[in-house]
Image: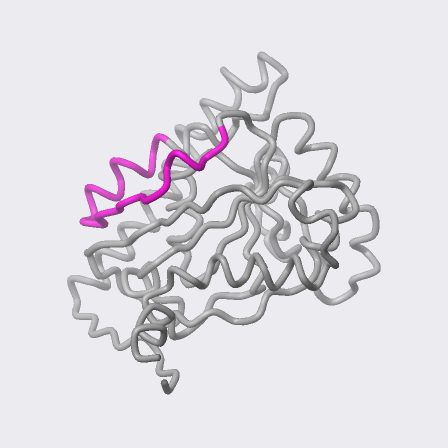
């Protein structure tokens, strides 16, 4: 099968929807988010659920903008915090969908995001950890930091492809999170995200209302991968996430 970019036709309405969508998030983060941070997290001196408001916020926002999310495998979401979500990456919507459908979470995210005023403060307070792509040596000790924050009650989300795809087809996973998982015995939760790229493209300003789907797989616990190499764990997690992608199902049917 040839790999072609998402074929998206955006009119003025779609462009305006995208603009209002981003504005809604920005204004809410500055107002409601700041209010919640001060009156709840700061006064309690507990920031582990700083993103709890995001989990609540995106459910009605999706409905308002016509994004119809369905979730398969909700029973696989751990009841106790302290797990790492491993997901494919198509769109900015992926982050919003994880909040709305899975759990409030911190992220391993590119260090450039910490250069943005206010956003850098919010990322730090959520427990998120910057990843330096230019100088990997600056990432030394990240595994221990991730382990300590997971142990303190933070969930994390990682997109191991490293960047969003243009066509919805998954790229190979990078090693980082799986090396840390092997070293620090992290519980991994594989997640397949479908059609977010069709709703909000990474390359064109436009929001196209319609369905998206999240498929939550059973956790991968440390005892399940203790005898696997890092590469085997990486490829195993990739295969699990990719197994539910529509193009993968089509290939299997044709075979």
How many numbered discs sit on the rendered protein? 0
Image location of residue 138, percent across then percent down? 81, 56
Based on the displayed image, in which of its 4 quarters is residue 165 positioned? bottom left
Image location of residue 149, percent across then percent down? 69, 32
Image location of residue 148, percent across then percent down? 74, 32
* Residue at 70% from the left image edge and 58% from the top image edge: 176
Task: Tell me, yes or no, whether the highlighted magenta stretch contains residue 63.
Answer: yes
Task: Tell me, yes or no, whether the highlighted magenta stretch contains residue 206.
Answer: no
Left or right of 103 on screen, residue 27 = left
Residue at far top of view: 44
Q: Nearer the viewer, residue 164 or 87?
A: 87
Q: Which residues are magenta?
A: 56-78
* Residue at 73% from the left image edge and 37% from the top image edge: 147
What color scheme is it?
one colour
**Which quadrant holds the N terminus?**
bottom left
Left or right of 158 on screen, residue 196 = left
Q: Nearer the viewer, residue 70 or 97?
A: 70
Left or right of 234 on screen, residue 40 = left
Residue at far bottom of view: 2
- In this picture, is 78 found above or below 249? above
* Residue at 39% from the left image edge and 28% from the top image edge: 32
């Amino acid at each position: 099968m040839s790999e072609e970019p998402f074929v998206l036709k955006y009119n003025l309405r779609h462009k305006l929807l995208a603009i209002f969508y981003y504005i809604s998030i920005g204004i809410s983060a500055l107002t409601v988010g700041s209010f919640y941070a001060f009156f709840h997290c700061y006064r309690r001196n507990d920031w582990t659920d700083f993103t709890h408001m995001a989990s609540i916020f995106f459910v009605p926002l999706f409905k308002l903008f016509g994004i119809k999310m369905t979730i398969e495998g909700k029973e696989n979401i751990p009841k106790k915090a302290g797990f790492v979500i491993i997901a494919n990456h198509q769109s900015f919507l992926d982050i919003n969908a994880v909040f709305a459908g899975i759990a409030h979470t911190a992220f391993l995210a590119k260090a450039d995001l910490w250069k943005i005023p206010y956003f850098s403060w919010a990322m730090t307070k959520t427990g998120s950890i910057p990843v330096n792509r230019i100088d990997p040596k600056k990432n030394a000790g990240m595994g221990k930091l991730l382990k300590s924050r997971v142990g303190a009650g933070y969930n994390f989300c990682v997109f191991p492809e490293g960047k969003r795809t243009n066509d919805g087809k998954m790229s190979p996973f990078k090693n980082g999170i799986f090396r840390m998982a092997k070293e620090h015995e992290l519980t991994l939760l594989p997640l397949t995200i479908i059609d977010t790229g069709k709703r909000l493209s990474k390359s064109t300003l436009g929001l196209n209302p319609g369905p998206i789907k999240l498929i939550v797989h059973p956790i991968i616990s440390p005892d399940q991968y203790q005898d696997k190499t890092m590469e085997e764990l990486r490829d195993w997690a990739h295969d699990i996430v990719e197994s539910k992608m529509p193009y993968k199902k089509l290939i299997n049917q044709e075979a």
